[in-house]
Amino acid sequence: MTELTKLTISEIRAKLGAREFTALELTEAYLSAIEAANKKLNAYVTVTADKAREMAKASDARIMQGEARPLEGVPLGIKDLFATEGVHTQACSHILDGFKPRYESTVTANLWADGAVMLGKLNMDEFAMGSSNETSYYGPVVNPWREEGGNKDLVPGGSSGGSAAAVAAWLCAGATATDTGGSIRQPAAFTATVGIKPTYGRCSRWGIVAFASSLDQAGPIARDVRDAAILLKSMASVDPKDTTSVDRPVPDYETAVGQSVKGLKIGIPKEYRVDGMPAEIEALWQKGIEWMREAGAEIVDISLPHTKYALPAYYIVAPAEASSNLARYDGVRYGLRVPGRDITEMYEKTRAAGFGREVKRRVMIGTYVLSAGYYDAYYLRAQKVRTLIKRDFEQVFEAGVDAILTPATPSAAFGIADQEMNEDPVKMYLNDIFTVTVNMAGLPGIAVPAGLDSRGLPLGLQLIGRPFDEEMLFRTAYVIEQAAGRFEPRRWW
Amino acid sequence: MSVDTETVRRVAKLARIAVEEEDLERMAGELNAILGFVEQLNEVDVSGVEPMTSVIPIAMKMRSDEVTDGGKADDIVANAPQSGENFFLVPKVVE
């Protein structure tokens, strides 16, 4: 049954329609694959096998009746950040022990309404805070990719590390993910998968555990550009339950895949050429520029002068919002409670035991920058810098640039328990240097696999678009995908 | 601006996170590393720049002021570590 798990969503759609196999057979193939692989990869934190079979049977009935919906019978993995009714939802944190919501997030409800099948919940960095999936209470996810000839375990990136690893290792046909500073695009780049962070406001945040509310946005991780387009069409919606959900119809993104890029202006920002960037990434970027040019696009040099300030501003804004959002974990309404001699001690002990090191660090930073006397110097200044970052992009788009091409990450996947990164939190944060600007400005960004480095590890390129022009990203990313080809890990697990 | 262990203790109190004495030093170091990193924002001229309040310019949505949901007390307390008769139970707060 291994071939079944290798099919893309568009192939599944065609083959289920042609009755080449049933949705139940497909789901069983995935459940067996998860059973065989999860001990080694740790991509799933819970598998909902019974529910999956039930949903697949319902899909088969629909197909028999000729009433197939857009994602009928497509088995998906769901990041543990999305509330799924009656199913483990803990943001991979200890503090949400045992939490099973009585409601369903809008994004997952949209997927089920379109016929998708839930395989289970995917591992992630605790509360989506991390770039390596090592901060999860459930332990690190192992990247299905290894160096050629090597057997060292590598990180899949984060925070959507379970999503990226599961898609790359054929443990789901596609996955939901979220991106606050790069959490969809960086893991996609580390695993040779496609990940898109849509424009802020495109996918409802309702029912997604909040990290930094002005930056969080859901999106898919998929095997190829077309699958990402198919998934985003179902995930996106206008939702009255989220006041930041933007009132715009969702286009059929798939029609953008394959459209010509002739005459489009692709901007190359000089500020993304950072010190110490590996030559291989620079070379890959050049290759991407050549591919776009050969496809008929016009390449223009652009400047985004405030780029270098995006990451420091992010490390004020995101922790500040997190410290406020995470105040709700108090041992009263859900999850873990550690008793204390009074209510304050109960709060303090619960939060000390329930939050991991990175989460505590960010809550502390956030609390500090928002505390009396520091607000103006840190938070207010960061929000002003954010205005400048957004303005940089606006000016470039006003000048006629259709999309911006950059590297997705400053390196390929690194080892689990990397000493340098563990000793210096800032070093870990630098993983998001190319992706975080996009969150700060609310823009859409896509990471697409573009090649392998000399050790055989995947590298990705990023395309950034105008607000709500996700179609442009699918169109341009497809050109990269066509030129670069697709990349699969060698199965060792 | 450099954070000392006393400040860490104060911030931890504000954040309602119990911190062991022996961890104060390490946490001060980590916070200082991050604060040192964000210091570079001081180079940016932000005079006359409006702070961002909304990344996508949209008007706040309004809806009619009516009850659209409710009657779910069982659901709301379902995940509580301790509850009784649809109340959350906490240690005594009023003497």
Image (cartoon, coloured by chain):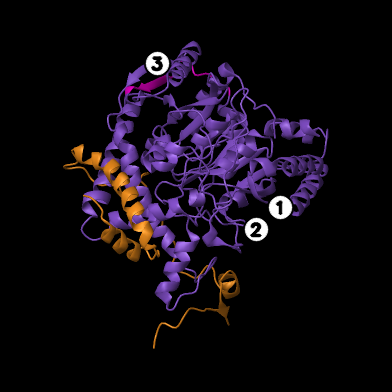
**The residue positioned farthest toward the bottom in the image shown:** B95
Q: Judging from the image, what is the letter of the chain drawn in orange?
A: B
Return the mark for residue A48. 1
Marks 3 and 2 in Cβ contact (< 8 Å): no
* A24 or A394, nearer to the observer: A24
Residue under the point 47% across and 80% down: B91
Q: Which residue is mark 3?
A: A299
Instruction: Say whether residue A259 is magenta.
Output: yes
The first of marks 3 and 1 along the sequence is 1
Image quadrant where one finds the N terminus of chain A: top right
Describe the element under mark 3 as helix, strand or loop: strand
**The residue positioned farthest toward the front in the image shown:** B22
* A337 or A235, nearer to the observer: A337
Residue A168 location, quadrant: top right
Placement of A4 over or under A315, stated as above or below: above
Q: Judging from the image, what is the letter of the chain drawn in purple?
A: A
Closer to the eye: label 3 or 2:
2
Residue under the point 34% across and 45% down: A315
Closer to the eye: label 3 or 1:
1
Spatial separation of the CA atoms under disc 3 and disc 2:
48 Å
Q: Which residues are drawn in magenta?
A: A258-270
Marks 2 and 1 in Cβ contact (< 8 Å): yes
Q: Which residue is mark 2?
A: A87
* B27 or A399, nearer to the observer: B27
- Of the residues shown, which amino acid type is indicated by label 2? Val
On what subunit does the disc labeled 2 rest? A
